[in-house]
Image: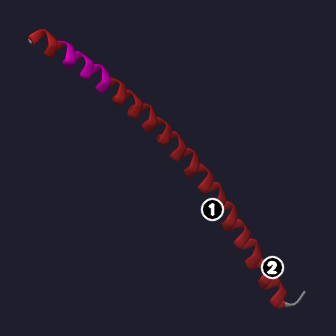
Amino acid sequence: MSEYDKTKSDYRLKLDSILTENKNALTKIEGEYKDKYDTLCKYHTRLINDMKRDGEKFDVALEQCE
């Protein structure tokens, strides 16, 4: 094996290693993002439901004042 082929092979191994690390990191980040997005959606739904409930309470209180 020539020096060029050995260097090329070494660079290919390093590149493959880096690509694998990046792929693993991306998978981890995607999982964390999905968890945070799901939590945000849950809180958003809860906020909307709370606003509806509070709005209904306000309407009832307003009717009682009239």
- Which residue is the extreme one toward the top? 64
Q: Whole-percent x and y of residue 24?
A: 65, 55
Position of 45 relative to 18 (above/below): above
Q: Nearer the viewer, mark 1 or mark 2?
A: 1
Is residue 21 left or right of 2 when viewed as pictured? left
Q: Whole-percent x and y of residue 31?
A: 58, 45
Q: Along the polypeptide, which appears first: circle 1 or circle 2?
A: 2
Predominant secondary structure in magenta?
A: helix
- Which residue is the extreme one toward the right? 1
- Which residue is the extreme one toward the left? 66
Q: Residue at x 76, y 76 (%)?
A: 12
Q: Whole-percent x and y of residue 1?
A: 90, 86
In the rendered structure, which amino acid carries the disc numbered 1?
A: Asn
Q: Residue at label 1? A: 22
Label 1, secondary structure: give it: helix
Instruction: State the extent of the magenta-drawn residues as a range.
Output: 51-60
Instruction: Examine the structure image and report whether residue 57 is included in the region drawn in magenta.
Output: yes
Label 2, secondary structure: give it: helix
Q: Residue at x 62, y 52 (%)?
A: 27
Q: CA distance from mark 1 to mark 2?
A: 20 Å
Is residue 47 left or right of 40 when viewed as pictured? left
Position of 28 relative to 16 (above/below): above
> Mark 2 Cα within 10 Å, few/some/many (few <14, many 20+)?
few
Depth check, front residue: 40 or 16: 40
Q: Residue at label 2? A: 9
Position of 21 relative to 38 (above/below): below
> Mark 1 Cα within 10 Å, few/some/many (few <14, many 20+)?
few
Instruction: Examine the structure image and report whether residue 56 is included in the region drawn in magenta.
Output: yes
Is residue 61 left or right of 36 when viewed as pictured? left
Q: Residue at x 71, y 72 (%)?
A: 14
